[in-house]
Amino acid sequence: MKKIIKNGTIVTASDTFQADILIEEGKIALIGRNLQDTGAEIINAAGLYVFPGGIDPHTHLDMPFGGTVTKDDFESGTIAAAFGGTTTIIDFCLTSKGRPLQESIDEWHQKSKDKAAIDYSFHLMIGEINDKVLAELPKVIDSEGITSFKVFMAYKNVFQADDETLFKTLVAARDLGALVMVHAENGDVIDYLTKKALEEGHTEPIYHALTRPPELEGEATGRAAELTGLAGSQLYVVHVSCAEAAEKIAAARSRGIDVWGETCPQYLVLDQTSLEKPEFEGAKYVWSPPLREKWNQDTLWNALKSGQLQTIGSDQCSFDFKGQKDLGREDFTKIPNGGPTIEDRFSILFSEGAAKGRITLNQFVDITSTRAAKLFGLYPQKGTIAVGSDADIVLFDPEKERTISAGTHHLAVDYSAFEGLSVKGEPVTVLVRGEYVIKDRQFTGKAGSGQYLKRAKYFKHKTHNNVIPAY
Ligand code: URP
Ligand code: ZN
Ligand code: ZN
């Protein structure tokens, strides 16, 4: 059925204006004043912002990690995402050495296909580069529409790849039109520091942060950026947590190297002191990279404001406090890394960012949606409100105040990392391709109704003479 959204304030990455939106067959058919269609359902958005649906470019759902599997899968994770105003996720498909890439991709399709309630796509982890992997990559891009590859520079003996692998991946991505993503921490030195801490009898969660100092994130970020410049390729640094890394990205960009940076809600509102909470509660706050000293938050906000960091990913990777985080009670290196963030990414950026004047409303849309759509080959199908785009729309009440809590969230995990945080603004109604997924704060969607998205190549490959657009 056709729908008309009336009386709302439309906000895109570039404009804020009053207009109605006609939705037909899942697409935005018309934007204008006083739209009429006798066959259409009228949605009254008076007093609400009308945002493009959030795009979360960094999730780990149903992922084996740290001797266990994330608590939230594609069903609970995407339903929670929808409540939080996110209509598309890009999840990380893990691979293993020696296993055909297609097998891993098929496994991720199995995990997601009957479960996802919003649209989704995959990034592909690259742990090794050899002739077999190189032979498979064109099909990964052309048939699967997977146009971003992830290389881990940390997690030694688990996911970590060496610099040769990173460099060869950058070169292959340059030639094929893919964007390389890195987890930038120096895994070798972290391995040394963690072993030393354990030898000295330090087992508590705070040692997770103390053995992964910001210098090691800055060093790895700078190394990845230099290798990108040398390869003439393109790089996206995930989960930037500290000034040392943000500065390396800014410096590389000022030299014309094609580097982009993402931060996450946890680094914007939480800090390292959370890892010192008693009764092992610090384990709830174990992420890699770790939470940092509080002053880094200002650096990250300023980097978002100035455009030196461009996106926010949730890095959703949840483990129950009881039964999963517990695995590391006697040894901090055994605490599964990650936390629940998918539902609050959008609201935290609005409340702490746009509502407090740290970023503009249009920057909020760019950072939570539009930029990710452009970088990851989904634009303009996703990431904006324009005629012809998918009707992925969030009706957002900017005045609604609430307190984040595990008691009210929609994730399966048993705690909230943001327990007690007051936020201003709430997604009220969320449409994916014109269909209600959340209607007046009730889930009205369906597990399995999310569509898999094949993505276009990195945009550098579509522009004349390989000139990188200013955006
Ligand atoms: O601690 C984190 N970030 N867990 C998820 C895996 C990763 O490194 O992104
Ligand atoms: Zn990571
Ligand atoms: Zn991650």
Image (tube, rainbow, N blue to C red):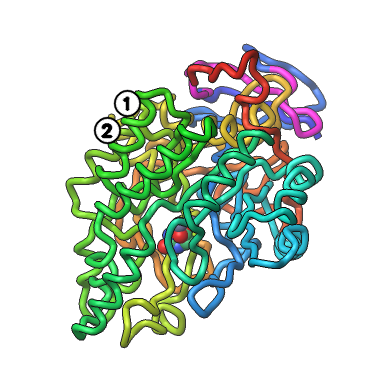
Q: Is mark 2 within 8 Å of ligand 1?
A: no
Q: Is residue 200 left or right of residue 90?
A: left
Is the C-beta separation of discs 1 and 2 under 8 Å? yes
Q: Callout 2, which amino acid?
A: Asn
Q: CA distance from mark 1 to mark 2?
A: 6 Å
Magenta highlight range: 10-30
Residue 47 lies, in percent from the top left, at 47, 29
Label annotation for residue 306 = 1
Q: Quadrant of residue 97?
A: bottom right
Quadrant where ligand 1 appears: bottom left
Magenta region includes residue 14: yes
Q: Is residue 62 left or right of residue 194?
A: right
Residue 153 lies, in percent from the top left, at 44, 56
The answer to whether one can see residue 78 in this image is no
Label annotation for residue 302 = 2
What is the chief secondary structure element of the magenta stretch?
A: strand
Q: Residue at image x 49%, y 62%?
A: 160
Q: Callout 1, which amino acid?
A: Ser
- Helix, strand or loop at label 1? It is helix
Q: Quadrant of residue 205?
A: bottom left
Residue 10 versus residue 349 in the image, above or below = above
Q: Is residue 202 left or right of residue 84?
A: left
Q: Tell me the quadrant of the picture where the N terminus can be found.
A: top right
Q: Count of labels shown?
A: 2
Q: Residues within 10 Å of mark 1 (few under 14, many from 20)?
A: few
Q: Residue at image x 54%, y 70%?
A: 70
The answer to whether one can see residue 255 in this image is yes
Q: Is residue 410 left or right of residue 272?
A: right
